[in-house]
Image (spheres, helix red, strand yellow):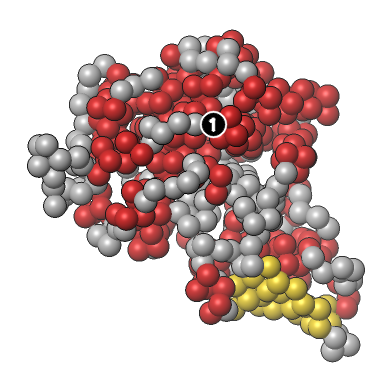
Amino acid sequence: MIPGPNQSSLLEQLNALNERPIAPADRHRAARHLLDWMACRAAATRLPEAAAFARALHPEGASAAAPRLLHAATPELEGVLADGALGCLLEMDDVHRSAVLHPGPVVIPAALAAARGAKADVKRLLEAIVRGYEIMIRMGRATGLEHYRHWHPTSTCGAFGAAAGAASALGLGAEQTVWALGNAGSRTGGLWQMRHEAVPTKALHTALAAQSGWLAARLAAQGFAGPRNLLEGDQGFFAATAPGADRARLLAPERTWLIHEVSFKPWPACRHAHPAMDALLSIEPRPSIREIERIDVTTYAAAIDFCDNREPTTSGEARFSIQHALAGILLLGRPQLAHYQVERLADPSLNALRKRVRLAVDPAYDQAFPAHFGAGVEVQLTDGARLTAAVDDAWGDPERPLQDGDLAAKAGDLLEFAGLSPEQSRELIDQTLALAGRDDVLAVHALSEAWT
């Protein structure tokens, strides 16, 4: 039902929840996610998909633009688009479980571009990230698994988060922010069909979501109005994409900002593969390849839907393969970006191991999803012995968090992949984690220049 002229719409109520105070601990959390995204983005510039974006955005001199993709003279509109694509390419971007989406690759590019354009200080940037995550997660929780069947929530709900983050960085008022949310949401989309083919379309989804949220906020700042009843209207977002949306979860009061519920991903694979990876990694000592008869994995249905691929042919497909992830651990050890390089995929030993991995749905894990991502692994040996392990939550979830040192180590690995020296990496990591204690404008611009 559409509210009357004197009643608040869902977007207005949602935005009102987003105006509560933000504490130093919340800003530190935002700085951690900023570091995580920036490191993912830096490493992704080495991928072929980044070169494709470079050629599209910089048709003249694309070869020079490809390694870093962006430079100081890049227009903001193009910059947000490129940044939105890069953050998710390596499948190491942060994730919120119950919303089933990845806030970082969408919210941070929009908030960062808006902060740079508005010459905002560090405090405003970090608070914009907190507010953008909040709106995006609330939208993901509300739309739920019904929406998730066909729609890519990082894209659909991400446009709202990007708009909220950009609006906060620009210092927009309540009415203007609602306009931005309404306009960003009115054109959002992203269908899951793309995951059934070896294509990088997922990155285009995040790029367009970030860009549309940023643009909607910039337009709102100029008085460009948007539909305040976009969520509940008869031809609105919920009616079109999630008729069973849970409005209570959209507007539920929370004791803390939802950014604290977001998980960090330690491994370069789809998050749905991580529980099985963590379970296998907990088996010590791991058996030799010659001893292994087969590996049985039990997990929730969505993990199998997304990550059942015994014969990946591209790096992207390998990141969505539980079989490849486990085979890589058994043959090569601790998961590394190098395990997913395309030249690795034809390795006969990896191929043989992938074929020994069997996946099955466990009702207990399936019932716990999406609040918890769990899996069990049983390694059956040729002598009849069985090695078993299980996890109810993956490493990096709030129940098993990555500490600052763990996050710095991940960022260091990514920056090494990007071609930086350990000294350069350490300086960038320390500088970014220290942002929450600063409040100057120059830090935002200096950080952007350093990372690009």
Q: Does dot 1 land on a helix, a strand or a loop?
A: loop
Dot 1 alpha-carbon crowd within 10 angstroms: few under 14, some 14 to 19, many 20 or more: few
Q: Position of residue 398 (x, y in %)?
A: 62, 53
Is residue 56 among what the camera can see? no
Furthest-bottom residue in this view: 384
How many marks the image carries: the answer is 1
- Closer to us: 220 or 302: 220
Q: Residue at x 44, y 41 (%)?
A: 134
Q: Position of residue 131 (x, y in %)?
A: 44, 34
Residue 95 horizontal side relative to residue 35, left or right: left
Q: Residue at x 21, y 55 (%)?
A: 239
What amino acid is at disc 1? Ala
Is residue 183 among what the camera can see? yes
Residue 287 horizontal side relative to residue 148, left or right: right
- Closer to us: 78 or 118: 118
Residue 7 horizontal side relative to residue 351, left or right: left
Q: Is residue 19 above or below residue 348?
A: above
Q: Residue at x 66, y 18 (%)?
A: 450
Q: Is residue 112 above or below residue 145?
A: above
Q: Is residue 109 above or below residue 346?
A: above
Quadrant of the rendered structure where residue 408 is?
top right
Quadrant of the rendered structure where residue 222 is?
top left
* Residue topped by disc 1: 23
Quadrant of the rendered structure where residue 64 is?
top right
